[in-house]
Image (tube, grey):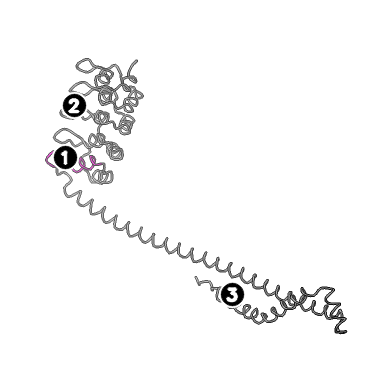
Amino acid sequence: MMAKPNPIPELKQRVKTLEGQVRLLLPLIEEVRLLKERMDSWSLHGLEARKEEEKVGSSNDFKELQERLNLKDRELRQTQAELEKLKEESERKEAELRHLKQKFEEQQLRLQQEEVTSSDQIVLSLQEHRAAAEVRADLDETDSEGRTQLHRAAERGDTHTVQLLLDAGSLVNAVDLHSYTPLYLAAREGHQGACRALLAAGARMDVKTRLAGCTALHGAAWYGQRAVCQLLLTAGARPSEPDDRDQWTALHWAACKGHAPVVQLLLQYGAERRARDKKGRTALDLARDNRHPEVADMLED
């Protein structure tokens, strides 16, 4: 598209020409000023006295002088009006030029951003392919604790890597030396995105840890991860299921730590507040023993 011609130089030239015309009128304007001064200094009495002294002149002199003055005034006003009109037109053209310049700069910026975005997408795609290749290379490798890459990605909440590993075929319900699953680690740390990806891939919520015999819901309740608890409960986790070691339900775990929001959520999902552990204690007893009065008030019948 051809660039629009710039009208500013032509307008400036017209203004310069008019200014030259005004300078030519300056002597005439000075003459008008002197005539005005003469008219101001003449009173009717002074004019009559001068006529008597010189016995010359008539009222026609005054009329002629006034007509010349009026003519010069009209010429001056016309010139000033034309200058004002040219000035307004110049300002309008300058504003239009600024607007066009701004649109051009915005378009340039948008094109630059699109280029950067396209470049970033290419780099990201290359990184994803490289990451996927690295993932497949040691998919089943475990560390000293028996954890796979999926365990580690889930524990740190790296949802993108979790999904890459799941797509590559990583075992969603793999257990480490403590029988921790990736879901248990993600739930314990409160990583909702990783939990959603794992649940969507078929992660089991009933797998229990080796020492305490607790599930992902127990772990999330113990660490006060309300959002993850709700996610698990919505997915079908059982709120009153006890662990294997002490027969604590998720409500026991949350009450012991004083996590009032989690306690309230579990009660809303039907958790049994009167469930007792191996020692006959309820969640209310644990809340009182550990000095959590707010939670105790919630658990009282």
Looking at numbered disc 2 in the image, what kind of residue is underneath it? Gly
Magenta part of the chain: 143-156
Residue 151 magenta: yes
x, y (%) of residue 42?
Answer: 80, 75
Q: Total label count?
A: 3
Assign the C terminus to one quadrant of the image: top left
Query: For mark 1, does the 10 Å Cα neighbourhood hold few (<14), some (14 to 19), or many (20 or more) residues?
Result: many
Does the CB distance between marks 2 and 3 fall below 8 Å?
Answer: no
x, y (%) of residue 96?
Answer: 55, 66
The residue beneath circle 1 is 147
The residue beneath circle 2 is 213
In the rendered view, would you say 238 is above or below 87?
above
Looking at numbered disc 1 in the image, what kind of residue is underneath it? Arg
- Which residue is found at the position 84% from the left and 77% from the top? 47
Viewed as shown, does residue 10 lie left or right of 137?
right
Looking at numbered disc 3 in the image, what kind of residue is underneath it? Leu
Which image quadrant for residue 75?
A: bottom right
